[in-house]
Amino acid sequence: MNTKTDAPSARMQLFYGAGGVANGILTNGLSFFLLIYYNLVIGLPAETVGLALSIALIFDAVSDPLVGYLSDNTRSRAGKRHPFIYLAIIPIALLYWFIWNPPETLITETQQFWFLLITAILLRTAMTLFDVPHNAMVPELTKDYGGRTTLSGLKVSIGWIAGQIMVIAMYVIWLVPTDTMPYGILNQAGYQQAGFVGAVIIALAIAFSALGTRRWQDRMMDISHDATYSTSGFFRQSIAAFKLPALRAIFISSAIYAVGAGIGAALWTYLTSFFWELNNDQISLILVANLIGALIGGITIGMISRTGDKKASAIFLSILSAAIGAAPYLLREIGFFPANGTELLIWLLFAHGILQIILIVWTTALLTSMTADVVELGISQNGFQNEGIITSVITFVLKAGSAGGLAASGVFLAYVGFPESPDQSNLTAEVTRALGWNYACLTLVVYMASVIALMFYRLDKAQFDELLALQK
């Protein structure tokens, strides 16, 4: 059996990375379709949907570090992490199904708002029980500097692959236009059927990852500080973790970057359907491009894991993500992009989709790995072994990307004047132009803000190696 200082084995990569299937299906389901489902199908205003998810994010700010603290201080025969993951499996599956099946008795906007808010809070709390302990495994499974990027990157890549497959299935199975429903994205039964399938896959993926990583649970037993279960202990250890400048920098940068990706996901259906005017077959082709991008990103993550400077690489990739993400819309604005309905447009968007997802996978893997590296800094500076609290940042960032992206997108759609029931009478050229141009500007601003925050991260490989040497 390999040791903590060895690079992760293929088996470890498989079982740990499989947890990304749950993240991908849940995150893509909510990011790509929850806003459009509750806005255009259920009938809630977009800004109301955004408000509900913004409020849920406030609960995440407490539940994520709390679950991290509890798992950091848990002593059990199953280790610190697995008991929480086992506990999460059934609630996540049930709540994911439930959020797509609001009771028919909820007929007013107020009733629908409260249903969405409460269900979202419960679903995201259940996800916390899985994802926080799961992310906390990374610094415990391996002390290898590049190995952490490999594990983090595989989970991200597998998450994107699973999520993209599910999105493709939405368009080719559940949201197919018919003579009676020309806009397939308005098919409520399709969302509900997909919700059931997604719930089953999420539960199976979490169970597979949890059972598969049990062989290394002995690495998740050690607690270098006095274990406590108390309010004062929670605040003392959480404050100590967030006093670390490196954690604050990576948290702010990652959260902003994730919101940028979340905005792109939430507006993706609006942009492909109404700005680029793609049909379902063409949308499915672009989704295949995204899937190819996720596959390439995962296959090449080893190259990224060998980078000597994670921070410099993450900054470069973030800037490139901003430029690539905004380019088609800026070029269209100045007349240097093919017209809608042309074959050249489809293939350019296909290539754009591949490159954009590769960049997102690489950047997210680096940011996640950089967060895990802060664990050693915490042990050295404050004496607390807080893998859970520190890596809870990753889970919160994932949720911030989904909820923050949806919330920002709701406000954005209201700002550009996008109609709640779009048709040929109200979807004017001015509205679609505003949709693309303002999206490009918002993308550039968000990603540049992420880069600025990342510049304050101070932990390179030489410092990391010194911290490991001090622990021996």
Image: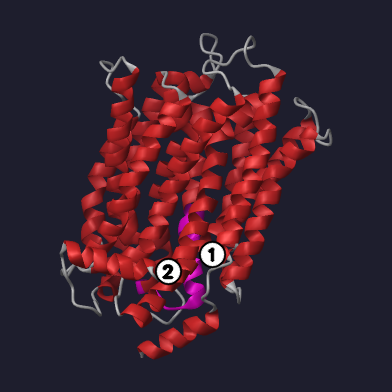
Going from the N terminus, do you reach mark 1 or mark 2 first? 1
Query: For residue 215, what is the image quadrant?
Result: bottom left
Residue 396 rendering spot, x and y as whole percentages: 39, 53
From the image, give the main secondary structure of the stretch colored magenta.
helix
Residue 53 rendering spot, x and y as whole percentages: 39, 37
Q: Which element is circle 1 on?
A: helix
Q: Which element is circle 2 on?
A: helix
Q: Is residue 138 left or right of residue 203?
A: right
Q: Which residue is mark 2?
A: 372
Query: Which of 435/353 is in front?
Result: 435
Q: Which residue is mark 1?
A: 366
- What residue is shown at x 65% (from left), y 29% (from top)? 435
Query: Which of 462/5 is in front?
Result: 462
Q: Is residue 152 magenta?
A: yes
Q: Inspect the image, locate mark 2, and give the three-letter code of the amino acid beneath it.
A: Ala
Q: Is residue 132 left or right of residue 161?
A: left
Q: Is residue 269 magenta?
A: no
Q: Which residues are magenta?
A: 140-158
Q: Callout 2: 10 Å neighbours few (<14), some, many (20+)?
A: many
Contact (Cβ within 8 Å) of mark 1 with mark 2: no
- What residue is shown at x 55% (from left), y 68% (from top)? 456
Q: Inspect the image, locate mark 1, and give the three-letter code of the amino acid beneath it.
A: Leu
Residue 288 to residue 154: above or below: above
**The N terminus sits in image quarter:** bottom left
Is residue 287 in sight in this rendering?
yes
Query: For residue 423, what is the image quadrant?
Result: top right
Query: Which of 221/225 is in front?
Result: 225
- What residue is shown at x 60% (from left), y 33% (from top)? 284
Q: Is residue 110 left or right of residue 419?
A: left
Is residue 358 in sight in this rendering?
no
Residue 455 to residue 112: above or below: below
Residue 286 rendering spot, x and y as whole percentages: 64, 37
